[in-house]
Image (cartoon, rainbow, N blue to C red):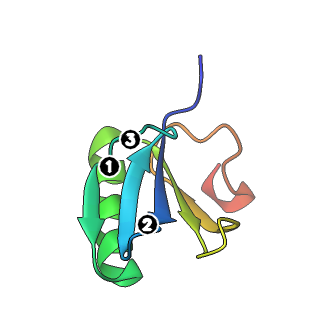
Amino acid sequence: MTRQEHHVVHNSNGGWDIRRNNSQRSSGHFDTKKETINRARQISKNQKTEMIIHNMNGKISNSDSHGNDPCPPKDKN
C-alpha cells in the first residue's frame, strides 16, 4: 500500500497547486504558496495524509504528517 500524500507544488503557469500522490489533476490552485499550504493542511488533516511542500524548483522543503505516521517523533510515543 502506498502512502497517501498531498503535495504543494509550483504551477508552471503561475501560482501553486495541491496534488495528491502526483496526480495529473489539481486539488486546488492558489496565487500564493502560503494560501496553498493553509488549504493543503486542512485537506491533509481531514483525509489523514502526509503533506509535502516543494520549493519552486521542485525539491522538498518541508513535510507534515496528519495521518498514521510510521516514524513519529520520540516525544510523541
Of the residues shown, which amino acid type is indicated by label 3?
A: Lys
Q: Residue at x 29, y 78 (%)?
A: 35
User: If you read the primary sequence from the N terminus, does the residue marked by circle 3 or circle 1 appear first?
Assistant: 1
Estimate the x, y position of residue 54 in percent, counting from the top left.
59, 67
Q: Secondary structure at mark 3?
A: loop
**Contact (CB < 8 A) between labels 2 and 1?**
yes
Q: Which residue is mark 3?
A: 48
**Contact (CB < 8 A) between labels 3 and 1?**
no
Q: Secondary structure at mark 1?
A: loop
* Residue 69 location, quadrant: top right
Foreground label between 3 and 1:
1
Q: Which residue is mark 1?
A: 26
Q: Is residue 32 above or below residue 36?
A: below
Q: Is residue 31 above or below residue 73?
A: below
How far apart are the alpha carbons under marks 2 and 1?
Answer: 10 Å
Horizontal arrangement in the rendering, residue 33 relative to residue 28 (left or right): right
Q: Which residue is mark 2?
A: 11
Q: Residue at x 66, y 49 (%)?
A: 72
